[in-house]
Amino acid sequence: MNENELMGSMKVSKAVAKMAIPSVISSLVTVVYNMADTFFVGQTGDPLQVAAVSLTNPIFILLMAFANMFGMGGSAVASMAMGEKNEKRVKNTSAFVTYASLIVGILFALILIFFMKPILYTFGANSQTYEMAKGYTFHVSYGAPFIIWSAAASFIVRAEGASSEAMIGSMIGTVVNIVLDPVFISGLGMGAAGAAIATTIGNILASIYYLWYFMKKSKSFSVSPKYFKCGEQVLSRVCSIGFPTAIFSALMSVSTIVLNQILVKYGNAPVAAIGIVFKANMFITFLQMGLANGVQPLMGYNFGAGNQKRFMEVDCFTKKCCLVVGILATALFFFFREPIIHLFINDKDVIYYGVKMLVAYMLSGPFIGILFVNMNCMQSTGDALPATILSVLRQGLLLIPLLYLLNAVLGLNGVIYGQALTDCVAIVLSMYIWGRKKRKLKSE
């Protein structure tokens, strides 16, 4: 089976399955990867260690913001270039994503190392959690280039139709992290710092795998420096198309900082609880995000090839899949909400807050996939502005003021419903905006 058959002529349901299933598995692997640190640190029975890892979540989210910008933007540009048979643009894109990821990662590492104390106190650290958060942050900092590039590379690989290879790369990092976490955290008694070391090693090995793929196996891509350029609209196209995904992650980091600052006033237990809930709820969110991201190359290819009918069929079928998956996953989490929180830590205060928070976060669970598909549709057509607006609203302009308002009016009980309320507004807006865009495309 060649690339043209998969992208351009294979039955839509079969093509979506072939592209989406490895992507979903990769997303779930990412969830397990993110859960691993919190889970194994939680086994120490120390809520302060869990709170320290929770406080450093914004750092990892910011790294993912750039990974998603380069990865999603690069994947969209590369898949459109493939549809247009522009081989040079494909190579320029993969090389740009590689070196841009490494450059930004190095800058991140320097900023984290030299400004660690003010950064962590801004994130909500206090005298009880600072030293533990500092250890975690230091070991993540030097892994930043590998964390960004390995995540971005997985998107680029999928643009070539190699979803299985993208999944393998993700699994390498996750398996290594899971194996090394108990060794460093409990075996060597390093706590939160040990979790960060395991994370960094996992990403280094995943990066080595992707480097091998690009150099030895890929038919279309290249990481040769001679193809690295920012001109000819490579930088502008990749970053503008990937910006909605990046701003989504970046603002998620900002909103997480705001949320931690609000919650720490109620004690360290709610901070530890929200860290666990954030990781647990990723299962529902990333399951649907994996579906949406998996089919993005299909959409970009068919839009670039001018096959609008197939583009719309992929859009419709993917949304149906997201809805079914979202309902089933949310129902599962609702019925097992207490055992899920208890799985991470055996502390009655953290479990009490965690169960309440998990129920609140699940309210938008069945439908959040519709938002991701709509945003990817807009990005695949090269129209990044509406998707950017939705991202800014969902994680910034709407969520952050709402968190302060709910805290002032309803206290802690109000704060925990902020994300779900914002998600519902963003979903409805995305349906309206993409509906108008679709009508415009059909008329053209």
Image (cartoon, helix red, strand yellow):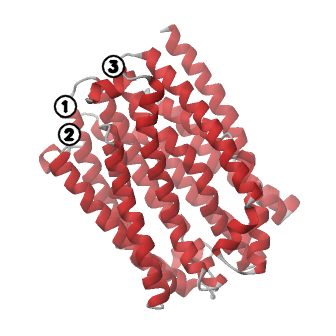
Residue type at mark 1: give it: Glu
Residue 352 position, x and y percent, is 79, 72
Quarter of the image where one finds residue 168: bottom left
Residue type at mark 3: give it: Ala
* In the rendered image, the vertical position of residue 333 relative to residue 428, given as above or below: below
Q: Which mark is residue 305?
A: 3
Residue 270 position, x and y percent, is 73, 73
**Residue position marked by numbered label 2 in the rendering:** 91
Residue type at mark 2: give it: Lys
**Closer to the camera, 79 or 313?**
313
CB atoms of marks 1 and 3 within 8 Å: no
For residue 107, say whether it is visible: no
Mark 3, Cα crowd under 10 Å, few <14 / some 14-19 / many 20+, is some
State how far apart marks 3 and 2 are (Cα). 19 Å
CB atoms of marks 2 and 1 within 8 Å: yes
Quarter of the image where one finds residue 393: top right
Residue 181 position, x and y percent, is 45, 78
* In the rendered image, the vertical position of residue 29 relative to residue 161, given as above or below: below
Viewed as shown, does residue 291 lie left or right of 394?
Answer: left
For residue 49, say whether it is visible: yes
